Image (cartoon, helix red, strand yellow):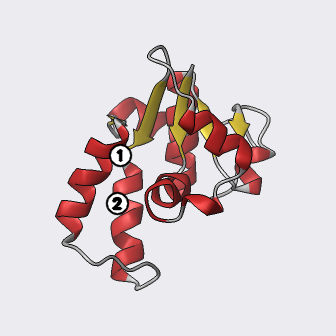
Protein backbone atom coordinates (compact mmCIF):
# COMPACT_ATOMS: atom_id res chain seq x y z
CA UNK A 1 0.00 0.00 0.00
CA UNK A 2 1.11 3.55 -0.67
CA UNK A 3 0.45 6.22 1.94
CA UNK A 4 0.90 9.94 1.37
CA UNK A 5 1.28 11.95 4.56
CA UNK A 6 -0.48 15.27 4.74
CA UNK A 7 1.86 17.95 6.06
CA UNK A 8 0.40 18.02 9.57
CA UNK A 9 0.58 14.21 9.86
CA UNK A 10 4.27 14.31 8.92
CA UNK A 11 5.01 17.05 11.46
CA UNK A 12 2.94 15.45 14.22
CA UNK A 13 4.51 12.03 13.63
CA UNK A 14 7.89 13.61 14.36
CA UNK A 15 7.00 16.18 17.00
CA UNK A 16 3.73 15.27 18.74
CA UNK A 17 2.64 11.76 17.72
CA UNK A 18 -0.09 11.73 20.38
CA UNK A 19 -2.08 14.08 18.10
CA UNK A 20 -2.38 11.35 15.47
CA UNK A 21 -5.50 9.22 15.41
CA UNK A 22 -5.13 5.67 16.65
CA UNK A 23 -5.88 4.41 13.15
CA UNK A 24 -3.13 6.53 11.53
CA UNK A 25 -0.68 5.64 14.30
CA UNK A 26 -1.45 1.95 13.81
CA UNK A 27 -0.74 2.26 10.08
CA UNK A 28 2.54 4.12 10.63
CA UNK A 29 3.76 1.73 13.31
CA UNK A 30 2.92 -1.37 11.28
CA UNK A 31 4.28 -0.51 7.86
CA UNK A 32 5.67 -3.48 5.98
CA UNK A 33 8.43 -3.60 3.40
CA UNK A 34 5.69 -3.65 0.74
CA UNK A 35 4.28 -0.33 1.98
CA UNK A 36 5.52 3.05 0.81
CA UNK A 37 5.31 6.28 2.78
CA UNK A 38 5.31 9.32 0.55
CA UNK A 39 5.52 13.02 1.16
CA UNK A 40 4.67 15.69 -1.37
CA UNK A 41 7.42 18.20 -2.11
CA UNK A 42 4.99 20.92 -1.00
CA UNK A 43 5.06 19.67 2.61
CA UNK A 44 8.60 20.82 3.48
CA UNK A 45 7.65 24.22 2.07
CA UNK A 46 4.51 24.29 4.25
CA UNK A 47 6.65 23.32 7.27
CA UNK A 48 9.04 26.20 6.54
CA UNK A 49 6.13 28.64 6.20
CA UNK A 50 4.83 27.52 9.60
CA UNK A 51 8.29 28.21 11.05
CA UNK A 52 8.42 31.60 9.35
CA UNK A 53 5.02 32.59 10.75
CA UNK A 54 5.92 31.35 14.24
CA UNK A 55 3.10 28.77 14.24
CA UNK A 56 5.58 26.03 15.16
CA UNK A 57 8.92 26.15 16.89
CA UNK A 58 11.91 23.84 16.82
CA UNK A 59 15.11 23.88 18.86
CA UNK A 60 17.57 22.99 16.09
CA UNK A 61 18.57 24.35 12.71
CA UNK A 62 15.67 23.97 10.23
CA UNK A 63 17.91 22.37 7.60
CA UNK A 64 19.08 19.81 10.16
CA UNK A 65 15.46 19.16 11.19
CA UNK A 66 14.45 18.59 7.56
CA UNK A 67 17.34 16.20 6.90
CA UNK A 68 16.55 14.18 10.02
CA UNK A 69 12.85 14.17 9.25
CA UNK A 70 13.49 12.21 6.08
CA UNK A 71 16.23 9.96 7.46
CA UNK A 72 14.19 8.97 10.53
CA UNK A 73 11.00 8.08 8.76
CA UNK A 74 12.25 6.62 5.50
CA UNK A 75 9.94 8.83 3.48
CA UNK A 76 10.03 9.12 -0.26
CA UNK A 77 9.73 12.69 -1.44
CA UNK A 78 7.40 13.02 -4.44
CA UNK A 79 8.60 15.94 -6.57
CA UNK A 80 6.34 18.77 -7.60
CA UNK A 81 6.55 17.84 -11.26
CA UNK A 82 4.87 19.66 -14.14
CA UNK A 83 2.36 16.79 -14.30
CA UNK A 84 1.46 17.10 -10.60
CA UNK A 85 1.18 20.86 -11.06
CA UNK A 86 -1.20 20.40 -13.96
CA UNK A 87 -3.31 17.77 -12.22
CA UNK A 88 -3.65 19.99 -9.17
CA UNK A 89 -5.52 22.46 -11.38
CA UNK A 90 -7.95 19.93 -12.88
CA UNK A 91 -9.13 18.02 -9.81
CA UNK A 92 -12.74 16.86 -10.14
CA UNK A 93 -14.90 19.52 -8.57
CA UNK A 94 -15.89 20.53 -6.06
CA UNK A 95 -12.55 20.92 -4.31
CA UNK A 96 -11.43 23.78 -2.10
CA UNK A 97 -8.95 26.45 -3.14
CA UNK A 98 -5.93 25.72 -0.92
CA UNK A 99 -3.03 25.22 -3.38
CA UNK A 100 -1.04 22.94 -1.06
CA UNK A 101 -4.05 20.67 -0.53
CA UNK A 102 -4.64 20.63 -4.28
CA UNK A 103 -1.02 19.54 -4.85
CA UNK A 104 -1.17 16.89 -2.10
CA UNK A 105 -4.45 15.53 -3.45
CA UNK A 106 -3.22 15.49 -7.05
CA UNK A 107 -0.04 13.74 -5.92
CA UNK A 108 -2.05 11.06 -4.11
CA UNK A 109 -4.29 10.52 -7.13
CA UNK A 110 -1.32 10.18 -9.50
CA UNK A 111 0.58 7.90 -7.11
CA UNK A 112 -2.58 5.89 -6.31
CA UNK A 113 -1.84 6.53 -2.64
CA UNK A 114 -4.06 6.89 0.40
CA UNK A 115 -3.74 10.28 2.11
CA UNK A 116 -3.25 10.17 5.86
CA UNK A 117 -4.91 13.38 7.02
CA UNK A 118 -7.11 15.02 9.60
CA UNK A 119 -8.32 17.57 7.04
CA UNK A 120 -12.10 17.17 6.85
CA UNK A 121 -12.26 18.67 3.35
CA UNK A 122 -9.89 16.02 2.02
CA UNK A 123 -11.56 13.25 4.03
CA UNK A 124 -14.93 14.15 2.46
CA UNK A 125 -13.52 14.46 -1.07
CA UNK A 126 -14.82 11.43 -3.00
CA UNK A 127 -12.08 11.37 -5.64
CA UNK A 128 -9.20 10.32 -3.38
CA UNK A 129 -8.78 7.70 -0.67
CA UNK A 130 -8.00 9.13 2.75
CA UNK A 131 -7.81 7.93 6.34
CA UNK A 132 -7.84 9.58 9.72
Q: Where is residue 38 in the image (x, y as percent from the top left)?
A: 44, 34
Cβ atoms under marks 2 and 1 closer than 8 Å: yes
Residue 122 position (above or below residue 64): above
Residue in the image at 28% along x and 78% along y: 59
Real-space Cα separation, disc 2 to disc 1, in angstroms: 7 Å
Which mark, residue 67? none
Q: Which quarter of the picture shows residue 58?
A: bottom left
Q: Which of 112 and 98 is in front in this view?
A: 112
Q: Residue tagged by mark 2?
A: 45
Residue 38 position (above or below residue 101): above
Q: Position of residue 120 (x, y in %)?
A: 77, 55
Residue lying at the far top of the rendered structure: 34
Q: Residue tagged by mark 1?
A: 41
Q: Position of residue 18 (x, y in %)?
A: 62, 61
Q: Which quarter of the picture shows residue 47?
A: bottom left
Q: Where is residue 119 in the image (x, y as percent from the top left)?
A: 69, 56
Residue in the image at 35% along x and 40% along y: 80
Please state, as top left, top right, bottom left or bottom right, where the N terminus lies in the image: top right
Q: Nearer the viewer, residue 40 or 94?
A: 40
Residue in the image at 55% along x and 38% along y: 28
Q: Is residue 128 left or right of residue 64?
A: right
- Secondary element under disc 2, as helix, strand or loop, is helix
Q: Which of 109 and 25 is in front in this view?
A: 25
Amino acid sequence: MKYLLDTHVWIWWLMIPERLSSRVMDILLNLTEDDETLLSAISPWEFCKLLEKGRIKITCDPEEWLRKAFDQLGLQLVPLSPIVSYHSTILPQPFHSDPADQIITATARLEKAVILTRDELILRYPHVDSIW
